[in-house]
Image (spheres, rainbow, N blue to C red):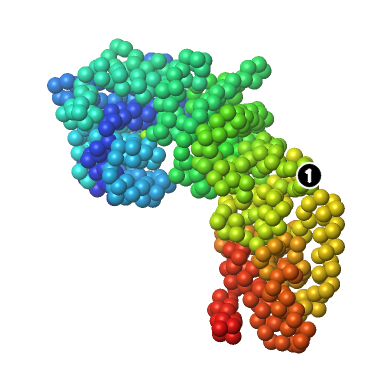
Amino acid sequence: MSATETHVFKSEARELLDLMIHSLYSHKEIFLRELISNASDALDKLRYETLTDEALKGALATGNEGEIRLEVDKDARTLTLHDNGIGMTRAEVIQNLGTIARSGTREFAQRLKEAREGTPDGNETAALIGQFGVGFYSAFMAADRVEVVTRRAGTAADAPATRWTSTGDGTFTVGDAERETHGTSVTLHLRPADAENGLPDFTQDYEIRRVVKKYSDFVTWPIRLGDSTLNSQKAIWTRSQGDVTAEEYAEFYKHVAHDWEAPYETLTLKAEGTFEYQALLFIPSRPPFDLYYREQKFGLQLYVNRVLIMERCEELLPDYLRFVKGVVDSPDLSLNVSREILQNDRRVGQIRKRVVKKVLDTLEKIKTEDRTRYAKFWDTFGKVLKEGLAMDPDNADKLKDLLWFQSSADATAPTSLKEYVGRIKEESGQDAIYYATGESRAVLEKSPHLEAFLAKGYEVLFLTDPVDELLVDHLTEYEGKKLQSVGKGEVELGTETEKLAAEEARKAKQTENATLLSRIQAVLDADVKEVRVSSRLTTSAACLVGDEEDMSPRLERLLKATQGVSELPRQKRILEVNADHAILARMRARFEADADDPVLTDFARLLHGQALLAEGSPLPDPAGFAQLVTALMVRAG
Ligand code: ADP
Ligand code: MG
């Protein structure tokens, strides 16, 4: 026998406890949901181990079926939850109930601080409880002392069980205990009931029944109080859709997704025939905090005949739909299924395909029926969905239809590609979908690249998400129209006749200015691969463009920043000048008088610098540029 020891909670756990105890959160009753969910998890884990571990084969056999038992002692004012699940060793007790030993801890601490800085309102607290899986400590909202007695399944009969106790004041004790069977009992020494502050009297059977029914009805293990079973245990996804209320779906969603808000959308799927399965899927209303953590594992819960086999089955969901939550249940898969088997199982691929189709079709339907509602989805998960175009060419057409973009056609409402194409006027001769990529709409709207397009009445899409730079690699055409960057290649606008005429005129100007252009080229040789007369510009003097296959300057910057590719060969771009601009006229005059005039060198550098600034790119030598401008002002003043 080893003595009872006192431990100090790890600091995040202490903060959390403190928050629980002093929480103004008005639904203190949810502690019961949390403890039942832990008991249910413990039973799931044991069942899973009995499948693979010979020594545990009899653990949940007849006569010892899995169950969660609630027990009330009215005189002592205690409520106890007994389960015959996996239990914990002494070390596990210290680890699991003394720390918050999970990857979200850092974020958790951060959010905790934020919640504290604002008013500690109920929703924030509830969010923390659910999102970070710190459910156990919620017991202290209802109890001023909590006692846990537990025995790990599979431990030697003569080894002691473990007792954990705490009053939530910063320390807990761990010692030996008597308990013969595997499983865990959690005893709450209830605080006085305080209905006004959301704490009903849990020594009353009817309160227990009500709360269990409300939050835990679908739990697959029986929850018993005396002789009665309180939950229907019906796996919610096996019930027909008409029989389940929106509230029931929402409660179940909160349980699987660790969310506190109702889902944005609920989807059901059923396949019958040679290969049967059912799925219940949810699109959350808000993004989980770890949506962009590459290490984070996503996926759907996988059940085989209502037995939970895998908490996060990634094989059932492509990465770009990682925000989708829910369960898939198939009686036809094997209970002993392993990751490796799953990865190679064609049927898993089949389910995944259906899941993807269902989600994309549902989104399309929402988009068509209710723009405002779709906007909510788009703002929340649109960026993630865009990743799909690169990953899932089979669904490219569906994905393209779900994309929304900012556009020059409307300052406030986004547009789909279909709507864009619908606005193209037959007589305009426009045969491409034009877009500009950059940091923000405000910068792009004023970019010189757009001048000719807007003058011609052509619509331009503004692609401002960093992922858009990669998106355009996979979004090369829509309904037979090429997607074309306004900053790349030569610009040919208008009808065939207009194009020919414009090209003739441009060539003439190009020839006329050829020697001056070479002079500019010589100055800018390190940065610019070509200097040519533009057909893009109407008001600006110059702009920088790329060849079709060149990286956009922003993509180049993003790659350097995110992947640390500092050795990327610097791309030279093309400087286009507006031959009709007054500056060019001045330069021509100077050049004709004296081809070596040093002012021409300054002008060339100024043109290049301006072009960079106008498109929102940083200057390679800001001080040098400032000096040139200053010198110019002095001369002009
Ligand atoms: P979560 O359930 O999200 O993991 P909790 O704070 O609810 O977080 O529980 C912490 C951990 O304590 C659980 O992960 C589990 O390892 C352990 N635990 C809690 N309750 C039980 C129980 N009834 N049986 C076995 N282990 C439990
Ligand atoms: Mg829990």
Residue at image position (81%, 69%) is 509
The answer to whether residue 462 shows anywhere in this view is: yes
Percent x, y of residue 348: 63, 30
- Rendered position, 153 above or below 73: below
Q: Give the quarter the ligand 2 occupies.
A: top left
How many numbered circles does the render carry?
1
- Front residue (pair 112, 405): 405
- Front residue (pair 210, 463): 463
Residue at image position (74%, 69%) is 580
- Image quadrant assignment for residue 424: top right
- The quarter of the image holding the C terminus is bottom right
Q: Check disc 1 and report the residue beneath it.
A: 427
- Rendered position, 111 above or below 52: below
**Residue flagged by tag 1: what amino acid is it?**
Glu
Residue at image position (51%, 17%) is 241
Give the class, few, some or many, for how many residues have Cα within 10 Å of label 1's Cα (few <14, many ≥20). few
Residue at image position (49%, 24%) is 307
- Image quadrant assignment for residue 27: top left
Q: Residue furthest left?
A: 75
- Image quadrant assignment for residue 365: top right
- The quarter of the image holding the N terminus is top left
Percent x, y of residue 520: 73, 77
- Front residue (pair 633, 524): 633
Q: Secondary structure at mark 1?
A: helix
Percent x, y of residue 45: 43, 30
Q: Is residue 529 left or right of residue 137?
A: right
Q: Is residue 349 left or right of residue 265?
A: right
